[in-house]
Image (cartoon, rainbow, N blue to C red):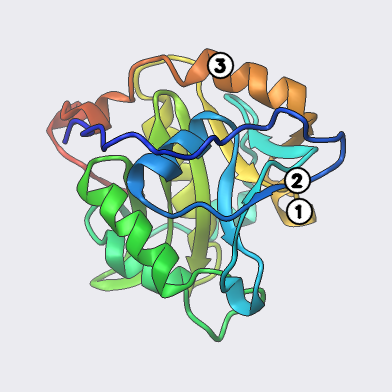
Amino acid sequence: MVPQEPPPTPWELTTEGALPGEDLVGIGADLEPGTVLAAYRAGLFPMGLGDGGAAPIGWWSPDPRGVLLPGDLHLSRSARRSTRGLSATVDQAFGAVVEACADPGRDGGWITPQIAEAYGALHELGWAHSVEVWRGDELVGGVYGLAVGRLFAGESMFHRAPDASKAALHELVAVLSEDGEPWLLDVQWQTPHLRSLGVRAVDRGTYLRLLRERVPQDLPSRWRGIPPGGGAVTTR
């Protein structure tokens, strides 16, 4: 589905004036599709400041920022072995992936019903996407986020089987790489786990430069309605 541009936001969303090392750069506004898209194009993303991601909405631009770049993904041999027999799909169960990521039993949960609804609306408009990982008919892992040009802003991922989230990340990178064009996978913060997978930390200036380069590019063919190989399903 070719993304549909929503009505523009009335809010000014910018990193201008943000201090080095300052992650939270704004509070308020709304979660309308036009607002969320404008935020990502400006290098921001929403996450609530209250318990469990509750209101008020905070607008974040981490400095440094965690990013995965072409050629950087690293999966250990054990991870590759453990994902054999799993299958991956794209945009086949977006709502189920968001629901699993929002499980209130997870530590550090921040995905509220309002956030889930906002990204569901963006999915309906063709901007938000998911990768699902299956063991037979059971959903055992996944990742979701926003695709704007050659930027994919990862929001959250989950696993219910060993290394299933790594399988989802591997499939996501495959989708981003299908046309051989450079891309930027934003993971917000570099954690020790993500660093082990190849995620690097860059300062805000570098991130915004990469953003300016990647956002104007065409979407990967998969999300322009051109499924490579005739389908959206791959099997590991």
The disc label shown at residue 176, or none: none
Mark 2 crowd level (few <14, some 14–19, many ≥20, 10 Å Cα): some
Residue at x 87% of width, y 40% of height: 21
Residue 9 in the image, given as x and y percentages of width and height: 39, 38
Q: Earlier in the sequence, mark 3 or mark 2?
A: 2
Residue ranking furthest to the left: 230
Residue 104 in the image, given as x and y percentages of width and height: 52, 83
Q: Quadrant of the N terminus?
A: top left
Marks 1/2 in contact by CB < 8 Å: the verdict is yes
Residue at x 61% of width, y 45% of height: 187
Residue 172 in the image, given as x and y percentages of width and height: 43, 41
Residue that carries the numbered disc 1 in the rendered image: 191
Disc 3 residue type (three-letter): Arg
- Asked whether residue 90 appears in the rendered view, the answer is no
Residue that carries the numbered disc 2 in the rendered image: 195
Q: Secondary structure at mark 1?
A: loop
The disc label shown at residue 212, or none: 3
Residue at x 77% of width, y 30% of height: 17
106 relative to 28, above or below? below
Disc 2 residue type (three-letter): Arg
Tell me the CA gap for discs 3 and 2. 24 Å
Q: Determine whether, in the image, residue 39 is placed left or right of residue 23.
A: left
Nearer the observer: mark 3 or 2; the answer is 3
Q: Secondary structure at mark 2?
A: helix
Q: Determine whether, in the image, residue 207 is placed left or right of residue 170.
A: right
